[in-house]
Amino acid sequence: MTRTLLVTSTRESIGKTAIAVALGRIAAGRGLSVGYMKPKGTRLRSVVGKTLDEDPMLARELLDTGAETHEMEPIVYSPTFIEGAVRGREDPDALRDRIRESFDGLAAGRDLVLVEGGGDVHTGAVVDLTDPAVADLLDAEVLLVAEYGEPGDVDEVLAAAADVGDRLAGVLFNRVDDAAYDTLEADVVPFLGSRGIETVGILPHRRDLAGVTVDRLAAELGADLLTGGDTDALVERFLVGAMGGDAALRYFRRSRDAAVITGGDRADIHTAAIEAGSVNCLVLTGGQRPPGSVLGAAEEAGVPVLLVSGDTLTTVERAEDVIRNGRTRDERTVEVMEELLAGHADVGRIIGNVAGEGGKEGEEGASGEDDGSI
């Protein structure tokens, strides 16, 4: 009998793809036949005249499913699709039938089908196909992926768990910083347990999975590199230089692994970013080169300076998109996620909830390498 696990999340870009594919590889390594689908394609790019989601393509490659992309992604959840749905051009019943038909084909002969949610737990509401609705349609259990950085994040978990209801197989916290780890483990996990919400893992923050390199950022933005420096440094966030130099310096010093985006004519901001010691690169907009003194200081400090022709607002939007959707998603990413799951999650319990006879093997693993942090 095929078992189904839907991997959803409280927020977008939280690591669902790497987690889903890593679980699939672990299950396959335990002798299970694994399928994958993402009913609502949300991480879109154009491929040979078609708009496709990159995540199913990665899953097909790493899980060797042999499925066609259109089967794994029956709905392209693009802005055009959403606009059409709002105008009444999409039939929710027909869409459900399309998803069910694709799923039935993918699930045939499989022990386990991993279904990746789109965006967050509520994505798809415009056509009555939120992740909980898809779970009901496919009779799937649900793994909820969440982040935790402050107490208020518990609200998101509780709200999402309430939406999922009895299908919830557990909560998996991802990218948890050291500063929040102890509180999450000692206080939040027992609290959630008292509400009937089981935590199945706490995965620590890994810098090599959390950002993009300066070199890749430059390539994605089409930027010219004006100075040398560490182009392998990671950028996890962007700061917009729109204040005075002194205020900017204090602001920049409170951040880490950041890129500063500002106009090419703001030499005071450039200087503050270089002096802060916590900025990994400067992105200058408007196509205007900074003074030679700025470039000299950046070269000496080892801070790469990128120059783009677009305006600051457009560049910020594009850069945020790169960070949100452009984190490295390849075999190495999945391998790291497999290691994190093995060391910090009860993989036996996660796979055992959905893997039939294979779950017995997973439960044995839980007493060994899967004995993680909870």
Image (tube, rainbow, N blue to C red):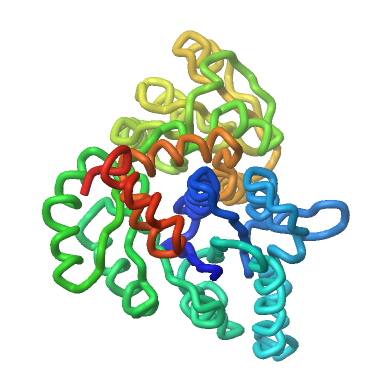
Residue 237 position (above or below residue 313): above
Residue 261 position (above or below residue 112): above
Say whether residue 156 is left or right of residue 233: left
- Does residue 193 show up? yes
Quarter the N terminus occupies? bottom right
Judge by depth and name the residue closer to the eye, 257 or 313. Answer: 257
Which residue is depicted at the point 58% across and 19% down? 291
Spot occupied by residue 152 in the image (x, y as percentages of width and height)? 23, 62
Which residue is depicted at the point 23% across and 44% down? 373
Residue 130 position (above or below residue 280): below
User: From this viewpoint, which residue is outermost toward the top?
Assistant: 300
Judge by depth and name the residue closer to the eye, 31 or 90. Answer: 31
Judge by depth and name the residue closer to the eye, 177 or 115. Answer: 115
Displayed quadrant of residue 369: top left
Which residue is depicted at the point 54% across and 29% down? 213
Displayed quadrant of residue 247: top left
Spot occupied by residue 355 in the image (x, y as percentages of width and height)? 46, 61
Which residue is depicted at the point 74% across and 53% down? 66
User: From this viewpoint, which residue is outermost toward the right?
Assistant: 49
Spot occupied by residue 20 in the image (x, y as percentages of width and height)? 51, 54
Spot occupied by residue 254 in the image (x, y as percentages of width and height)? 29, 35
- Does residue 10 show up? no
